[in-house]
Image (tube, rainbow, N blue to C red):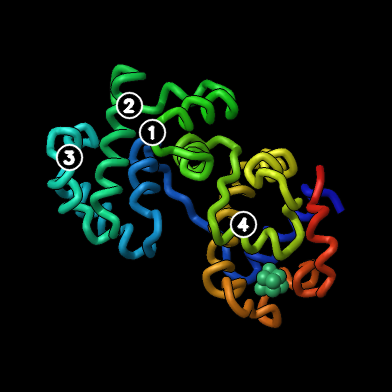
Amino acid sequence: MTGRGEARWARDRLVERFGDVFVPASDPVETLVVTILSQNTTDANRDRAYQAFVARFARCEDALGVDAKALAGVIRTAGLQDQKACAIQAALQSILARAGRLTLDFLRPLSTEQALSWLVALPGVGDKTAGVVLLFGLDKPYFPIDTHIRRVLSRVGWLKAGTDPHRQMNTVLPHDVELMRTLHLHLIRLGRTICRPRRPDCFACPLAERCVYASGDKTKQKEGISR
Ligand code: SF4
């Protein structure tokens, strides 16, 4: 089975279990702010912090008009608020300095690789954060990998030992925005609820049929999947 075939099989099993995903259109700068807020916290706390951010700042630019302490106070429900306030202001300031205005819409006509290069040059923005902006804010086919997805894909046997997971998955997966969005959101859900860091519940898992960890054959995990 090719990586494309495996990805479509996994997408179908996850949708059977968790249902279709609905992703509303979102502005890429707002997506970047939400992604920074989401680090090391729950979705509920991230959402509360972002609601407070939107209520306090009519435009993202306005978050640059206050000092970092004041911004940290607004987003405190996200946790790590001092660190996140500095990260948000540094990223917004850098976009403003490099693009001349606070927008990322000029990345839309660029290739995924070009847009990725631009985004990872922002302070504090790595492959995962840039990938979320590309996939959810700019409708570009780039698969972002967080700790849950990395753990699940390692156990399933998709990730080849010793390779960069973003590079590997973005070579192997079909360049299909909807498929990538569904896999991204549902693999996080799987990692939080079933394929937990300790004692994964393989009996309840929709991917168990093709999972290397569940089969007990750990040698296959080193091979990964290929195109
Ligand atoms: S079968 Fe078990 S180890 Fe494999 S993905 Fe599912 S929960 Fe994780």
- Element type at mark 4: helix
Q: Which residue is mark 4?
A: 150
Query: What residue do we see at 59% from left, 58% from top?
Result: 149
Q: Is mark 1 within 8 Å of ligand 1?
A: no
Q: Is residue 39 left or right of residue 100?
A: right
Q: Specify which label sits upstream in the sequence, 3 or 1.
A: 3
Q: Which residue is mark 2?
A: 94
Q: Amino acid at mark 2?
A: Ser
Q: Tell me the distance, in whole angstroms, between the alpha carbons under discs 2 and 4.
A: 29 Å
- Element type at mark 2: helix
- Element type at mark 3: loop
Q: Are marks 2 and 1 in contact (CB under 8 Å)?
A: yes
Nearer the observer, 163 or 207:
163
The spot of residue 145 in percent (x, y) is: 57, 50
Mark closer to the observer (3, 2):
2
Q: Tell me the distance, in whole angstroms, between the alpha carbons under discs 4 and 3.
A: 36 Å
Q: Specify which label sits upstream in the sequence, 4 or 1.
A: 1
Q: Specify which label sits upstream in the sequence, 4 or 3.
A: 3
The spot of residue 114 in percent (x, y) is: 56, 23
Q: Which mark is residue 58?
A: 3
Q: Please state, as top left, top right, bottom left or bottom right, where the N terminus lies in the image.
A: bottom right
Q: Which residue is mark 1?
A: 123
